[in-house]
Image (cartoon, grey):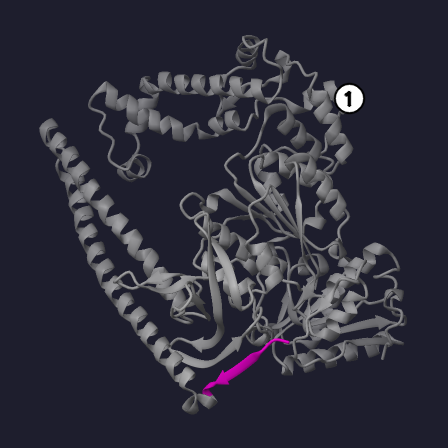
Amino acid sequence: MTEHVNHSANDSANDPVFIAEQEHLSKTYQTLVSMQKSIVARMEKTAATAENYKRTMADEATSNFASEGEAQETYIEYANLNSVIDALNQSQQVDAEKLSNIELLKPQPYFAKVSLQFKPNTNPKDIYIGNAGISDDSYHRLIVDWRSPVAEVYYNQSNGPTSYEANGRTIKCDLKLRRQFDLSEDTLNAYFDTTVAIQDELLLRSLSQQRTSQMSAITTTIQKEQNEVIRHEDVPALLVNGIAGSGKTSVLLQRIAYLFYQNRDTLNPEQVYLITPNPVFRSYIDNVLPDMGEKNPHILTWKEFADYVVPEGRVFNRIHTSLDVLKRIDEAIKDLKFTENDFRDITLKGVTLISANQINKIANRYKKVPAGPRLITLIREELEDRFESRLGQMAGTAQFQDEVSALNYNQQLALFGEPAQMDTEEQAKSYTLTYLNYRFGEARTTIQLNHWVRVDRIAKRLLSIDNLSFMEWLYMKIACTGLCNDEARFVMIDEVQDYSPAQLAIMARYYQRAHFLLLGDENQAIGNQTSTFNEVKEVFETYRGSIEECFLMTSYRSTPAITELFAQLAQNNSGISISSVQRSDKEPEITVFANETDLENNLERLLKENHQATGLTAIVVNDNNELTTMWSKLQKIVPADQLYFITDGSTLPDHGVLLIDLSLAKGLEFDNVIIPDADPQTYPNNDLARRQLYTAISRATNTVSLLAYQKLTSLLEGVNPQ
């Protein structure tokens, strides 16, 4: 049994530990305030100095070009001033990062403390853990980052002899004390001492809070099984199998923050991609990483991914395909041989830069190289060289040099960063080349993305397919040309069960060097194109060689009664653990009405009750055809300033009543959920409807109400309707 002691401010007068911890907090907070003032003053001084230098540069730019000699002196002065400004900018960057950490810490300087004894018969060392790490001006570590190696003993280990890994070494120690804090700025409200794992006190407080329009970080309440995912070793593919409410998305975001910390010298946000199920979900998670002091990675939906890789204006009559067709493409590519008709001219704005015939001649010079990505790479590299050569020739012509001369002062500054000085032929060509690179940038993209390869014609010849689906076209292009993003190092796919095996195979091929984190719940596969976890494993075993799996089987989101209800709908609920958090536990309300008037009256009653209880109430509709009808009903019941219709481009409100389609509700959570269509027509007795109902019910944290007209869906047999 876990030993647990709760000490609050009410007991502080007689508690020397509370007094000592309050003194430590006050001292730490004052140090943060003092450091903040010092850094702000230094940054203001640096900014003023840099501004003076920039003003000097601007004055030189507009006045000192009267003669060639004055111009030369001005360019030298430019270089010197730029060097000074660069140094000032670097200083500002260091200070800005430290200031950002202080601002992140001030609302809650730390949330935990561990006391570690590193050698026998020595005093334990107290280590305070916060959302960021920071040292004082004497380089004494005030607070350690929650992602640091030593912090793992707080999240994952029992009191007593333990160890952690740091810089390739195993550090042994004795964990004497684990202490959690409830504090705000410089005020200590309570502390909790525990002997094993993490006590639920802070978790309870977090879960009892009202839901807001955006997700919050779970740094202070990470549980052991969640921590195992967050700190999991880097592997080619990691599948996280988690039930509704187990914190999958929170874990995903904490994992990203952890990776940024572990690879802080080599990994930047541009190398991380997060594939989200819908735009509403993206806005919901948008602040989590910035609130932890990290920048967001690329966050995109499947549609946005597709729009990026497909040439503008290209339309497909079909979208999907099967994994078997993709395997056929891989086999067919082995026998591919290019012909001139497989290429198209590279043109832009009426100018043919490189013809298809020229491309074919390049290909013919590499007859010993099999058709495929390697040959395409060789051709593309030569095309890029020819493109640069062609731009170089054009830069020497009067036509394009005159276009540069016609640019006004502001246009020149925007394009060149300085006024264009075209006194010599060399200068004129240099500025004109920069201009042409900008003007013909789309042609460079055409070359780089291999849009000069006629994928449809190749597919028709190899596969006898006249009308490629989008996925067939994209996979053919990847297999044929090697089209990929080789800069991505990590790709995270949330709701992985909602992608078909073909979609997953395409992403695995496209992000060819990336490691994947895949999170999902088979019970929430509510679309037409989905994957079982066995299919997910098959895809990534094929394209990554191996895949590891972690499980999150404890649900924290909902009250135990709500969790019990949706757990009954799970395909295999034997492993589901209902968190024993103690919160107000109103039983789910399931009601069948003989007529629609009674149903609507009850809906109005529920909305009034939920409004009095505050929080966010979601009416989750599974039948898109009923959205308009339901909206009309709600407009008669709910004041306009408290009612929201959620669509793809919406952001969630902090409170009120919202109407939302089930597909957009995925991944979100609400204080109160009303399901107004729990009837056999909307939720028939089949696996898809079962998963849809599981998903809808599990959006609720505090209350859920299911309403049915005349008859309740048979999926809820055994549950007594009111």
Q: Quick check: is 604 in the magenta stretch? A: no
Residue at left 86%, top 73%? 719
| Front residue of this view, candidates 383 and 559 | 559
Evaluate whether residue 531 shows in this view: no
| Secondary structure of residue under mark 1 | loop
| Front residue of this view, candidates 144 and 589 | 144
Residue extending farthest to the front is 121
* Magenta-tinted stretch: 1-9
Q: Quadrant of residue 473?
A: top right
| Front residue of this view, candidates 516 and 415 | 516
Image location (x, y in percent) of residue 508: 63, 38
**Residue pointed to by mark 1:** 464
Q: Quadrant of the C terminus?
A: bottom right
Q: Quadrant of the N terminus?
A: bottom right
Image location (x, y in percent) of residue 371: 62, 16
| Front residue of this view, candidates 2 and 482 | 2
Depicted 627 relative to depicted 20: above or below: above
Image location (x, y in percent) of residue 525: 75, 53
Evaluate whether residue 233 shows in this view: yes
Q: Quick check: is 8 in the magenta stretch? A: yes
Q: Residues within 10 Å of mark 1 (few under 14, many from 20)?
A: few
Image location (x, y in percent) of residue 437: 39, 28
Q: Quadrant of residue 424?
A: top left
